[in-house]
Image: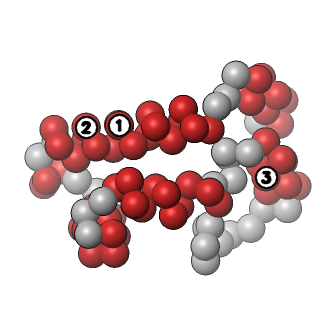
Amino acid sequence: MRGTIDSFYKDYNPPTDQKAMKAMLKLYRDDVPAKFHPDFYVSIVDKKFKGSMISMLMICSPDQYFRVKQKLNAFLKKPVSEGPGE
């Protein structure tokens, strides 16, 4: 994986990634029947964020390991088992 990091981040744009993620998750939620939604839609998005996927992403996104090349490299050098915000 380390050998591909530079090529991945060469054209990576975090704001574009966040916009695309918001759009894809909204389309999924709107177009796929609720019985096929993952449990986190109800347990996290609906209960903690009042159904707003955008609110959830705004809180979770800044700490994601893969958004910033330096954070990913630091994580790969010393992986942690906790997720962002834990």
The residue that label 1 is drawn on is 24
What kind of element bears circle 3? helix
Tell me whether circle 1 and circle 2 mark residues in contact (CB < 8 Å).
Answer: yes
Residue type at mark 2?
Leu
- The image's mark for residue 71 is 3
Q: In terms of depth relative to the viewer, which is nearer, 79 or 62?
A: 62
Q: Position of residue 55 (x, y in %)?
A: 40, 60
Instruction: From this view, report whether residue 45 is shown above or below residue 13.
Output: below
Secondary element under disc 2, as helix, strand or loop, is: helix
Q: Residues within 10 Å of mark 3 (few under 14, many from 20)?
A: some
Q: Is residue 4 visible in this depiction of the protein?
A: no
The answer to whether residue 61 is visible is: yes
Q: Is residue 35 above or below residue 85?
A: above
Q: Is residue 79 left or right of residue 33?
A: right
Tag 3: residue type?
Answer: Lys
Residue type, numbered disc 1: Met
Query: Which residue shows up at 77% across the image and 48% down it?
Result: 72
Tags 2 and 3 touching, CB below 8 Å: no
